Image (spheres, rainbow, N blue to C red):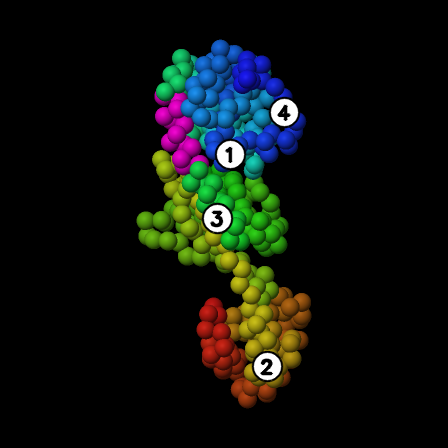
């Protein structure tokens, strides 16, 4: 016998998400403090093949959402205690639930309340008294989009891509693959839901000039390795403007360690000399190179003098030109 929606049964934390049959049914969380409203929607959704969870308060809704991570949430706007607007804001602030589409249910039709619903994180709203057929139709639209985004995330995870999803409007890092998490921690020292400031600034600058074409890549350097960011595509709510939308960003780490080793072998340089020559090729000054390698400009100058002798040149321009020619032969993909 199905559970009575008027008396929801608590499920131990962590157990619920593992017991839901997601392969054959989308999971819907209904949040309403009025049992009769719950019963009407529960029966309609259950008959349509959905797996239905219920909560009768804002606090219970947050607990259920983090336990089960439903595919969509139908959320009553006005409840005693924590209202639906605050529930939505908290759900959108948590990385594990920020991607869940929220459809508000409200008896309030004034514009200010509808705007509040959307600003707090809702993707849509239906007015009371609830019409189950209307709710089902609106749900299907948002579930389709959520399903496509979930499939994309699963594919990116499976193939090991370093990809993040950022909401341009408020700068929230909504989602990231495991490799992306590792790279952002290493290069930027940040964790979700914080988007690194250089990345967010680059994204917003690029979106403001989107009419001119795809923005140039962002490059963050860390020694002889660099992390590039490329804008992939907008996802999520198709009605959202570019400046407020959710964007997939693809990251790629490139290491020039092999390039430095090739210069060392080609010109019979020590490891340190090869590093100095690498940064000369990259256009760095002696002071810049000293800061990067932890040496003084005078030490860098002495390394360069020995490099010039070994390469048979007299200037850094000639050394850089000869090194670049050799690098292009061995590593055509090198970005000098």
Residue annotated with mark 1: 22
On-image quarter of the N terminus: top right
Note whether 296 is above or below 325 in the view shown.
above
Residue reaching furthest to the front: 1
Residue depicted at 47% across the width and 41% down the height: 150
Residue annotated with mark 2: 265
Look at the numbered disc 4 and give the secondary structure of its residue: loop
**Closest to the observer, 23 or 259:** 23
Regarding residue 133, the answer to whether it shows in the image is: yes
Residue depicted at 50% across the width and 29% down the height: 27
CA–CA distance between discs 3 and 4?
Answer: 30 Å
The reply, left or right, for residue 241 in relation to residue 87 is left
Residue 232's disc is none
- The stretch of residues the image draws in magenta is 134-146
**Closest to the observer, 82 or 211:** 82
Residue 243 placement (x, y as % from top left):
40, 41
Asked if marks 4 and 1 touch (Cβ < 8 Å), the reply is: no
Which badge, 2 or 4, comes first in the chain's sequence?
4
Look at the numbered disc 1 and give the secondary structure of its residue: loop
Which badge, 3 or 4, comes first in the chain's sequence?
4
> Looking at the image, is mark 2 or mark 4 nearer the viewer?
4
Please tell me how crowded label 3 is: few (under 14), some (14-19), or many (20+) other residues with Cα within 10 Å.
few
Residue 155's disc is 3
Residue 11's disc is 4
């Amino acid at each position: 016998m199905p559970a009575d929606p008027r008396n929801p049964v608590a499920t131990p934390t962590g157990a619920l998400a593992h017991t839901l049959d997601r392969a054959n049914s989308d999971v819907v969380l209904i949040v309403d403090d009025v049992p009769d409203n719950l019963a009407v929607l529960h029966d309609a959704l259950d008959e349509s093949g959905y797996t239905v969870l219920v909560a009768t308060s804002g606090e219970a809704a947050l607990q259920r959402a983090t336990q089960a991570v439903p595919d969509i949430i139908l959320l009553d706007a006005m409840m005693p205690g924590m209202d639906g607007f605050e529930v939505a804001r908290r759900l959108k602030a948590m990385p594990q639930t920020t991607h869940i589409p929220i459809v508000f249910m409200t008896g309030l039709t004034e514009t200010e309340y509808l705007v509040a619903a959307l600003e707090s994180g809702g993707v849509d709203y239906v007015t009371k008294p609830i019409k189950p057929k209307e709710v089902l139709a609106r749900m299907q639209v948002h579930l389709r989009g959520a399903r496509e985004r979930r499939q994309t995330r699963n594919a990116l995870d499976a193939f090991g891509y370093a990809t993040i999803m950022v909401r341009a409007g408020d700068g929230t890092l909504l989602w990231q693959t495991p490799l992306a998490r590792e790279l952002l921690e290493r290069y930027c020292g940040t964790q979700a839901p914080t988007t690194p400031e250089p990345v967010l600034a680059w994204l917003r600058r690029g979106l403001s000039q989107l009419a001119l074409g795809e923005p140039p890549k962002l490059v963050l350097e860390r020694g002889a390795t660099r992390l590039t960011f490329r804008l992939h595509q907008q996802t999520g709510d198709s009605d959202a403007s570019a400046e407020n939308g959710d964007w997939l960003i693809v990251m790629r780490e490139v290491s020039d360690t092999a390039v430095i080793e090739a210069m060392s072998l080609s010109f019979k340089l020590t490891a340190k000399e090869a590093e100095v020559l690498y940064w000369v090729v990259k256009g760095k000054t002696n002071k810049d190179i000293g800061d990067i390698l932890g040496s003084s400009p005078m030490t860098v100058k002495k390394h360069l003098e020995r490099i010039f002798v070994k390469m048979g040149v007299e200037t850094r321009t000639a050394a850089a030109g000869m090194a670049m020619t050799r690098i292009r032969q061995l590593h055509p993909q090198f970005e000098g």
